[in-house]
């Protein structure tokens, strides 16, 4: 059965200067997980250390506020981050995340990334930051969902992890399916709904973490009066999606726009979720 809990049930611990860390996904809570997930609350004028192991990779998404990411082990470059910034941190990265106004950050690490992507250690990709609001939106062919890719081989140069944001308008229901070859978790950003794991329903709401094992069937229904939005991640990033008998295979249609209706910073072709490998332009 899926493992699910709300972030409000996880106590924060001190981390850096003026920072609280909630350890959401851990090996103790989910035995054998290959993804560790934290939520960081940065107070005003706070600084959090950022350290990624030599065989690991990291990723974080700004949930609110603003911050500055500084590479202290490299050239000392500082990157200003807004509330829609997403950052990929390569193996061996050392730096700080500082916030003058305060910020909320979702932070993930894959400690065994080099095992999931053997080429990662020999040719590590660089630090990269994107703005998810400028990324292309794809529409589901069979329902009202929207998808925005956050972590892909095209964006960040690794197949150790894959991530995306999914938007469910009110009343939207997805098809029942499971994945083969990867563990899978979601973090609920907004709204609420009903999740199903192996046909067993349970409620979900903003702040929930939902973790699915390999081969566990699942789908979601948005039952509120606002969009239900979550980010989801897979480790490794190459896996197979299998639909339940009678369910429609999801095809994602290119819209040629970002979430604000503007032309996006890049283009993605339409494609099917039945594809085991990511499309080259994703």
Image: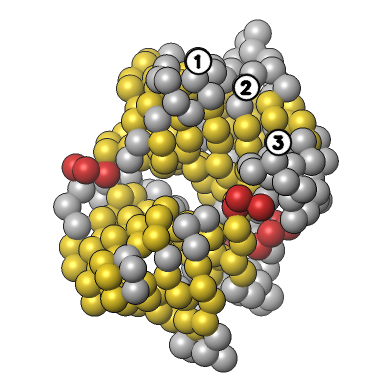
Residue tagged by mark 1?
171
Quadrant the N terminus occupies:
top left
**Above or below, comparing residue 118 to residue 169 in the picture:** below
Question: Residue 107: x percent and y percent?
Answer: 41, 59
The mark total stands at 3
Locate residue 176 relative to residue 28 in the image: left or right. Answer: right
Which numbered disc, 3 or 2, marks the residue that appears first in the sequence?
Answer: 3
Does 140 appear above or below 127? Answer: above
* Position in image of residue 238 (x %, y %): 65, 46
Q: Which mark is residue 256?
A: none
> Gap in Å between the C-alphas at discs 1 and 3?
19 Å
Bin the neighbour count of mark 2 within 10 Å (Cα to Cα): few under 14, some 14-19, many 20 and up.
some
Q: Residue at x 42, y 20 (%)?
A: 225
Left or right: residue 281 versus residue 246 is right
- Residue for point 63% across, 37% down: 147
Residue 241 appears in the figure: yes
Judged from the image, the secondary structure of the residue bearing numbered disc 2 is: loop
Mark 1 or mark 2, which has the lower sequence index? Answer: 2
Q: Look at the image and tell me whether residue 277 can be seen.
A: no
Q: Residues within 10 Å of mark 3 (few under 14, many from 20)?
A: many
- Determine whether label 1 and label 3 are within 8 Å by CB: no
Residue identifier under label 2: 144
- Please tell me which residue lies in front, 48 or 82: 82
Say few, some or many: other residues with alpha carbon within 10 Å of mark 1 (under 14 / 14 to 19 / 20 or more). some
Q: Label 3: which residue? A: 138
**Residue 59 place in picture, x, y as percent:** 50, 61
Residue at horizontal 26%, vertical 56%? 22
């Amino acid at each position: 059965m899926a493992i699910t809990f709300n972030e409000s049930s996880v106590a924060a611990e001190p981390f850096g200067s003026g920072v609280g860390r909630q350890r959401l996904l851990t090996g103790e809570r989910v035995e054998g997980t290959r993804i560790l997930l934290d939520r960081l609350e940065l107070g005003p004028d706070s600084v959090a250390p950022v350290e990624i192991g030599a065989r690991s990779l990291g990723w974080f998404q700004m949930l609110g506020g603003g911050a500055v990411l500084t590479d202290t082990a490299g050239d000392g470059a500082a990157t200003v981050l807004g509330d829609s910034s997403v950052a990929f941190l390569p193996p061996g990265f050392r730096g700080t995340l500082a916030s003058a106004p305060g910020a909320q950050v979702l932070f993930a690490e894959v400690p065994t990334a080099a095992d999931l992507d053997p080429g990662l250690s020999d040719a590590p990709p660089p630090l990269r930051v994107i703005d998810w609001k400028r990324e292309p939106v794809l529409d589901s062919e069979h329902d009202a969902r929207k998808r925005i890719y956050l972590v892909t081989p095209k964006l960040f140069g690794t197949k150790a992890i894959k991530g995306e944001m999914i938007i469910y308008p009110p009343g939207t229901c997805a098809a029942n399916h499971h994945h083969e070859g990867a563990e899978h978790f979601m973090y609920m950003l907004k709204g609420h709904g009903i999740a199903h794991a192996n046909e067993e329903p349970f409620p979900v709401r903003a702040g929930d973490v939902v973790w699915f094992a390999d081969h566990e069937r699942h789908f979601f229904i948005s039952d509120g009066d606002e969009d239900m939005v979550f980010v989801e991640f897979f480790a490794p990033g190459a896996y197979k999606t299998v639909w339940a008998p009678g369910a429609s295979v999801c095809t994602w249609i290119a819209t040629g726009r970002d979430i604000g209706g503007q032309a996006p910073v890049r283009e993605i072709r339409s494609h099917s979720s039945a594809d085991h490998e990511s499309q080259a332009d994703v």
